[in-house]
Amino acid sequence: MTLSPGKKREKIDRLSELAARDDERGVSLWQEAFRRLRGNPAAIVGAIILAIFVLVAVIGPFLVPYAPTDTIGIREGLIKPGVIPGPDGDHWFGYDHQGRDEFSRMIVGARQTLLVGVVSTLIGLAVGALIGGISGAAAGLGGRWGRWIDTTLMRFVDMLLAMPSLLLAVSIAALLGASLTTVMIAVGVVSVPVFARLLRGSMISQANSDYVLAATSLGVKKSKIALTHVVPNSLAPVIVQATLTLATAIIEAAALSFLGLGNPDTAVPEWGVMLADAQQYLGIRPSLAIYPAVAIIITALGFTLLGEAMREALDPKLRK
Amino acid sequence: MFRFIVRRLLQLIPTLFGLSLLLFIWLRRLPGGPETAILGERGTPEMRAAIRHNMGLDEPILVQYGRFVRRMIKLDLGTSTSTKRAVTTEFIERFPGTVELTITAMVIAIGVGIPLGYLAARRRGRFLDHASVGGSLIGICIPVFFLGYVLKAIFSENLHWFPSSGRQDPTLGATRVTNFFVLDGLMTREWDAAADALWHLVLPAIALASIPLAIIVRITRASVLEVLNEDFVRTAEAKGLTERTVRGRHVLRNAMLPVATSIGLLAGGLLSGAVLTETVFAFSGIGAFVAEAIGQRDYPVLMGFILIIAVVYVLVNLLVDLSYSFIDPRVRVR
Amino acid sequence: MRAPRPKVAIAAVAVAALAVAGCAESNRDDNSGGSKKDTLVFGVAGDPKVLDPSFASDGESLRVARQVFETLVRPEEGGTKVTPGLAESWTPDAAGTTWTFKLRSGVKFHDGTDFNAEAVCVNFNRWYNAKGLMQSPDVTAYWQDVMGGFAANENADLPPSLFKSCAAKDATTVDLSFTRVSSKIPAALMLPSFSIHSPKALQEFDASNVGGTSEDIKYPSYATEHPTGTGPFKFKAWDVANKTLTLERNEDYAGPKAKLKTLIFKTISDENARKQALRSGDIQGYDLVGPADVEPLKGEGFNVLTRPAFNVLYLAINQKGNPKLADLKVRQAIAYALNRQQLVDSKLPPGAKVADNFMPDTVEGWNGDVTKYTYDPAKAKALLAEAGASNLTLRFHYPTEVTRPYMPNPKDIFELLSADLKAVGITVEAIPLKWSPDYLNATTSGNKHDIHFLGWTGDYGDAYNFIGTFFDRPKDEWGFTNQALFDQFKDADSTADIAARTEKYKALNKSVMDFLPGVPISHSPPAIVFGKDVTGVKASPLTDERYASAEFK
């Protein structure tokens, strides 16, 4: 599930605002934020969860006891309709419905899950930043054309924002046909409007800030101001938002799988697909659903904790 | 205020035209058409071509769009290709379910979320604060469909407290008036039918409320914290007003502005959750119906739905803007 | 506005509630207080599409039709054999083109009118004389499947009609004439699409007026609100807002009356949700039980009924796809490579069997003496090497988002089959597509598909309905033209003598398995479940369950 537009707007506004304020005390925004992050237990917990997750995703596949596609249980005749054996000494989490080692699949699945989350967030970020950037620049440059471009783009973004995100994702998945790329694009597109509004908002408030006025009056070129001042200073809220979007992207991918539009490629396991597949076997082996569900919840929690903590750390209103 | 409302409503017309043209082209670009969905494995290429022809799908897209607009002006949204019933009839029968469900979910989210967020802020740093912040984080992170299954497994399958599916016990044979089952029960004095419909709403509404509840708790908490630091609260306390008055008249009221904004916008986002909740709880509503319509390439249903969503979105936002002026007298709409 | 807001809100709600209370009429029957034990709520996977079975081809519409309507002949309960329905007996003439049906007397339609020979002719003429949109293949799918065309075909692609005329000789005798001999008659007449409707109701509710503009077909009110037949249940209400359809007992039914007073079909599309609804008592039975749930539900004491398998799942091979596939040796290699027994044991419901023919053994014409391709990976490798296809790459299509009675879990089946193919050195390129429309489009047209799986559930007990549907003409699904085989089909279908015809079908099954256009994989018995205290229903291979005999213990 994605965050609701309400939450999106609230965050977007807050983040845009904070980006506009520059360091008042001489310490850079980032240094200050990092200092405050270290003191926040939620941030530390989030960071630890993510560190473990990334570690598992990167080296896990090399360490698993069984190949995640090896249908051991079926070859050995252990899997029958209505029978899925539970854990034993060799198979710590038992078998999945196709007789594969569940533990190995969970470990290998971390990589694919991370991949889906990261790539779809990057897609959302790239497209959103492009739209938001153009729109913000156009608004900043002003003039009739600038305003027209800005309004048109923002109208479009608002329409995207108004569409129920899951139905938007479903229709994109239907348009492109089922594949891993489709899932990434469908989940990514949903976050486009958020990033677009965010970047535009912070660029506009940057453009109106005193230092840009000062630079302009000193005769610095507009394009140089945009590249060296406005864009870098607008990035902080975008990075925070990306962290938060990663969490929702993973959950959204799981929802797509539940609706049967997930990645159909069975060679590489992914938690969302595993959770959706396991619904059928809730009656006979609920643990098959519980492992991926808990893994998804914990990972999403990690991203959310860290993201929220970063937001708080960067929020000038709370800097007291 | 009147002119404001009229202007906002007039803005709808160009939006709807633009949106419908875009959608029309977008939908027709989806690979495959309704004919395959209709015929299933029995279809042959010749049969599919015959159906495409019958439905006018082999004509130029602008001709098709022209027909669509002519019908839309008459408020006729056409016939669903998958159910063969008028789209407007489908909506009249299925929208009320979703509305009932989302309203109940919002009542739960607001009724629990605002007090909880407020208490968390008042007891900042204590157990209740940590518990509600932690709980709301988990509420955002748990996949809705999984929560639905878990709720059913506990409260329907094992405890038998709540029904696990549908909107009402069909053996009651309740009378239908508006298709809002609770309302129908009241209108016809079929009290048992109304109570039963309400009973069926509990589990799906809780599942659907999980995310908005979590968001409302956090926004309320943050907003109350901010207000508590404001000078006027300190002034009010200093001048010796009772805590009750300070809380009620000053803190809560001022903290409600951002909460109201988010509630208005949350209502739109609820539809995403409704797709999943309705599927899991076999709840007859528009969300699951539309998700299925995408798979069936049911163009008329999809067009009608998205246009209605656009209208609802504009209306909800209009209401939210209007509600500002009631909560905060400083805001005056023009 | 000095009153605290919550109180104002509560008062407002109370006032509103009082204001609406009683402002509409309750039209509820007062006899709803009776024992709940005569009402069965049954969970189904989808809403019916239309209540007039003449226009239906989806299982849920037909399920309703089977309770409300009757046909001239009907399958025996729990089987596929043709037994008396509204007709007591039937005989063909010497040429085999005119069939005389002797009808039951004393049967009344739900609207009180009499069932007789005249009514039968009204129905057949209604279908035969279809015009305009009623000739669309999605409207009269089964008529076109069985009879081909109409009195006046409006589309040049339609074949001439098999049906010729209907003559009522007296009140209980009717002659149906056909243009040629066909093995489909009389078995096809037990399809619910050939249900006999009340002529009065047909006229009153304008049943043949399938209207509207070309792009939105509008069905007459008969098809959505007034189905009127002779069956043990009468249609009462279709509550789309609650996804339920209610039938009530026909108190004037000619045969043994239904034991249930009320029968309700409730749509629960999610399989897991159906199971949870059964367990929590919302429903007292459901259809399309997942294979994994059969044993657990039995263990909990539910009445799980297994339908005799009347379907086939096959791996189709497209000879116009990869050119190597036109080589019989390569096709044989694929057949030997598949460990079908393992698939059946681990993934299909209890009672499933490996298929040797493209039709189940309950259909006349099944042949146990065909070439069998028992799992033998070594032989598969050898055959591939012989054919010079050792590094074969195949595009393997499989469907997503679907369960069919013959393939409860396509993704799982794909994984096992593709592992088998990989084991003999074939490179598999997985192409998952959404069942509808992408998968069906891709596998039944064009030639971008090499192998895929698909299946078929029989409509009635006739060999042609299985193998004829697949192989009686060139089809894009298989990509071959084998005129000898096509001629063999034509010959078998037009043989009037049943014994001779059965022999010809046996020979056909042998030819097919030697030619090996694809590999039949399995016949799996779909399950249906009823509550712990519900008895009396017999599972039918044709999904023709009769809820009239259901009762609570």
Image (tube, rainbow, N blue to C red):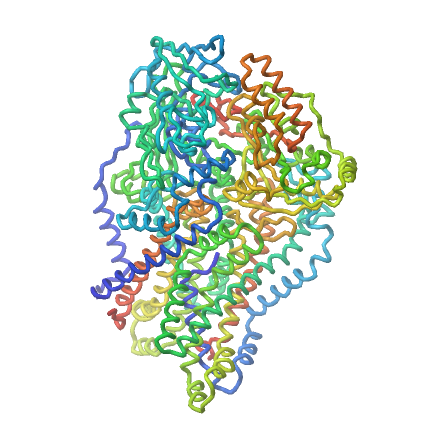
Position in image of residue B321 (x %, y %): 30, 65
Q: Is B205 located above or below residue A236 in the figure?
A: above
* Residue A137 horizontal side relative to residue C463, left or right: left
Instruction: Say how many tags the image has.
Output: 0
Q: Is residue B329 left or right of residue C55?
A: left
Q: Nearer the viewer, residue C544 or A220?
A: A220
Foreground of the two, A215 or C318 = C318
Judge by depth and name the residue closer to the eye, C457 or C351: C457
In the displayed structure, would residue C61 be above or below residue C415? above
Instruction: Quarter of the image for the N terminus of chain C: give it.
Output: bottom left
Residue at the limit of the structure toward the bottom, as seen here: A218
Q: Position of residue C382 (x, y in %)?
A: 79, 37
Most foreground residue, C55 or B102: C55
Residue C39 placement: quadrant: top left
Residue C319 in view of the camera: yes
Q: Is residue C552 visible?
A: no
- Residue C208 found in image quarter: top left
Residue C400 picture quarter: top right
Q: Position of residue A192 (x, y in %)?
A: 47, 64
The image shows residue B26, relative to residue A306, as above or below, that is above
- Identify the residue at image location x=41%, y=28%: C64
Expressed as whole percent of the image width and height from the top left, the position of residue B183 reads: 29, 44
